[in-house]
Image: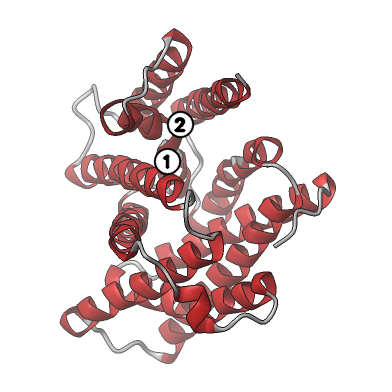
Amino acid sequence: MPLRHDIRRGVVLMLAASAIFTLMSVVVKWLDGRIPVAEIMFFRSALAVPVVLLVVARSRRGASFVAALRTKRFPGHLLRACTGTSAQACSFYALALLPLAEQTALTNTTPLFVTLLSIPFLGEKVGIHRASAVVLGFVGILVIALGQGAFAGALDDAARLGIMVALAHGIFSAGTTMLVRGLSATEASTTITLWQSLLMTAFAAVALPFVWVTPGWHEFGLLLLIGVMGGAAQVMLTEAWASAQVSALAPYSYSSLLWAILFGWVAFGNVPALATLAGAALIVVASLYILHRELRRRKR
């Protein structure tokens, strides 16, 4: 897909995608206790496949489906789908245990874990600047945990598990990011995305017979809505990245925190504590600074 170099278009699409993804999280949270996480994941992934096929068709200008699937690195795609499925499962499960704002803030820790994992797996040397940003980000995590009562003995088992699962999402998502970096050296982005969607759907389908709960018409409608919103937001995100450079658009992706605060208040009556706001701000600042240092390193 050609880069259009239209920053305004990219910003609008990024803001819209962030809002829709966050609204999708609201619907996932509504289904908590009624539909198992694996079943929600199946509908989310399966209904996104036609959207991905549309993107592949547009970007490859009529190339065949088989051509888009052709790869010599299937094990890499398989491992990438495993980390992606694990990240999605952690994200959806954390929604059932934490308020929307806290879950969104903690699942935005991916850049912190990417920096940490790059040391043992990529052999990178992390200097004082990026190391300080990682420390700042983890201070933000501790501030959010403090707001949940972690250091006052008030943190119940569900909230404690929710924080750990949300952070596990950051780790799995960071692993996914690193795998995509490696695959991108030889694979087209459309090939990576197509294999991701197909394999994640297959993984969820394997678990489906063991957890299946027949949804009522209301629940079925919400499951369809999750798939449609996820697919639409995925297209918007793809179009956004095709419209401007990552460095220009990445800061706008953190608008999901603002949407999470708004939707959490409107849908669930959750007013985020000052500690949540402060911790989220520290995580965002740390992540953006890591992005800034990464760009400077690439220029050098």
Let me know if residue 88 appears in the view: yes
Q: How many numbered callouts? A: 2
Q: Secondary structure at mark 2?
A: helix
Residue 179 is tagged as none
Relative horizontal placement of residue 38, taking residue 20 as reference (left or right): left
In the foreground, 281 or 157: 281
Furthest residue toward top:
128
> Which residue is depicted at the point 39% across and 28% down?
115
In the foreground, 158 or 48: 48
Tell me whether the residue at label 1 lies in contact with that at label 2, contact meaning CB atoms closer than 8 angstroms.
yes
Nearer-N-terminus badge (1/2): 1
Residue 204 in picture, x, y percent from top left: 29, 74
Q: CA–CA distance between discs 1 and 2?
A: 6 Å
Residue 102 is tagged as 1
Residue 42 in picture, x, y percent from top left: 36, 76
In the image, what residue type sits under mark 1? Glu
Relative horizontal placement of residue 114, taking residue 263 as reference (left or right): left
> Which residue is depicted at the point 63% across and 39% down?
250
The residue that mark 2 highlights is 276
In the image, what residue type sits under mark 2? Thr
Q: Quadrant of the N terminus?
A: bottom right
Which image quarter: residue 16?
bottom right
> Which residue is depicted at the point 57% across and 84% down?
64
Residue 65 in picture, x, y percent from top left: 52, 82
Mark 2 surroundings: few (<14), some (14-19) or many (≥20) residues within 10 A: many
Which image quarter: residue 219?
bottom left
Relative horizontal placement of residue 212, taking residue 140 as reference (left or right): left
Mark 1 surroundings: few (<14), some (14-19) or many (≥20) residues within 10 A: many
Q: Secondary structure at mark 1?
A: helix
Let me know if residue 48 appears in the view: no
Q: Quadrant of the C terminus?
A: top right
Which image quarter: residue 140?
top left
